[in-house]
């Protein structure tokens, strides 16, 4: 089933990382963490990939808008997204996807996000914070610099409202300008997970990010003896 919605605005960060806000169509339902097929109108940009792609929804069902985050590129879709004015009508398909909060709350959850892979985790963390679900969540978020990190201050502030949520953010390209960042630095690794996540041995792990990052995280978890059934992945390739 298709839905039509109006584009509201965009917030462009460093390195072409961009947050898009779209009106939520009447009757549109989804579960925090899911994705949908997103289509834009033909504005003269064309390529073999077309004007439709799957995007994770970064907002929770409790929010009034649909939020998407992506990194702009030269693809026809991304060029259209960069140029379309507010009020442009876009199309959405019904949301799908298994990367959602489980019904049971006894097992700790660890979210490992890289870059724009934060989208489903921002949605789930907002859901668990705005309407407390009882899940114990540790979010690890890796990006290159603070300037290109969407939702940074919001995510770091969430544990003040949700005592069951812990957020650890690390930057990988701070060398020479450490005054910009007083948090963790370096790539996500096993020691970082062990240090900042109580109960990591029993947790279920969700991974979302660029393919190289996701593969590296999976290998890291394997070295930590995390069983494969407790590792769930979603890849965010550039388009």
Image (cartoon, helix red, strand yellow):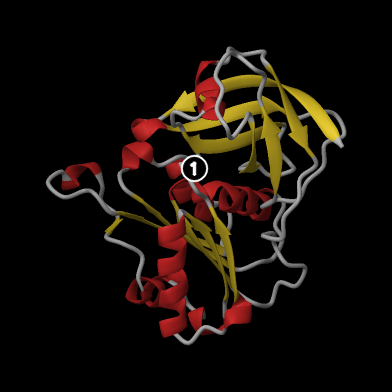
Residue 206 is drawn in which quadrant?
bottom right
Would residue 144 appear left or right of 197 to someone viewing this image? left
Would residue 97 appear left or right of 55 to someone viewing this image? right
Helix, strand or loop under label 1: helix
Residue 216 image position (x, y, % from top left):
40, 68
Would residue 148 appear left or right of 104 to someone viewing this image? left
Q: Residue furthest left?
A: 176
Q: Residue furthest bottom?
A: 225
Residue 28 image position (x, y, % from top left):
82, 36
Q: Residue drawn at (67%, 13%), measured in percent from left and top?
A: 87
Taking depth in this image into account, of 176 and 64 the one nearest to the observer is 176
Residue 174's place in the image compared with 133, above or below, is above
Q: Residues within 10 Å of mark 1 (few under 14, many from 20)?
A: few
Taking depth in this image into account, of 209 and 203 the one nearest to the observer is 209
Would residue 47 appear left or right of 114 to someone viewing this image? right
Taking depth in this image into account, of 233 and 238 the one nearest to the observer is 238
Q: Residue drawn at (47%, 72%), measured in percent from left and top?
A: 218
Image mark count: 1
Taking depth in this image into account, of 16 and 202 the one nearest to the observer is 16
Q: Residue drawn at (57%, 64%), measured in percent from left and top?
A: 233
Residue bearing mark 1? 154
Which quarter of the image is occupied by the N terminus? top right
Residue 224's place in the image compared with 45, above or below, is below
Residue 134 image position (x, y, % from top left):
69, 65
Residue 29's place in the image compared with 221, above or below, is above
Residue 239 image position (x, y, % from top left):
50, 39
Q: Residue drawn at (52%, 50%), measured in percent from left and top?
A: 236
């Amino acid at each position: 089933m298709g839905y039509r919605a109006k584009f509201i605005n965009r917030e462009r960060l460093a390195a072409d990382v961009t947050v898009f806000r779209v009106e939520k169509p009447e009757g549109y339902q989804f579960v925090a963490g899911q994705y949908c097929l997103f289509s834009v109108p033909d504005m003269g940009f064309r390529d073999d990939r077309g004007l439709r792609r799957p995007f994770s929804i970064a907002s929770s069902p409790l929010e009034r808008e649909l939020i998407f985050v992506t990194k702009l590129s030269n693809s026809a879709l991304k060029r259209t997204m960069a140029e379309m004015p507010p009020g442009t009508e876009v199309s959405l398909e019904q949301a799908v996807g298994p990367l959602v909060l489980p019904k049971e709350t006894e097992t700790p959850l660890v979210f490992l996000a890289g870059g724009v892979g934060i989208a489903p985790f921002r949605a789930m963390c907002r859901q668990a914070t705005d309407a407390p679900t009882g899940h114990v969540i540790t979010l690890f978020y890796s990006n290159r610099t603070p300037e290109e990190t969407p939702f940074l201050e919001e995510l770091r502030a969430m544990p003040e409202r949700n005592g069951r949520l812990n957020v650890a953010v690390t930057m990988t390209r701070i060398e020479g300008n450490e005054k910009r960042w007083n948090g963790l630095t370096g790539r996500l690794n096993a020691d970082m997970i062990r240090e900042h996540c109580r109960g990591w041995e029993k947790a279920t792990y969700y991974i979302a990010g660029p393919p190289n990052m996701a593969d590296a995280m999976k290998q890291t978890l394997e070295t930590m003896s995390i069983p494969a059934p407790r590792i769930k992945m979603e890849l965010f390739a550039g388009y």
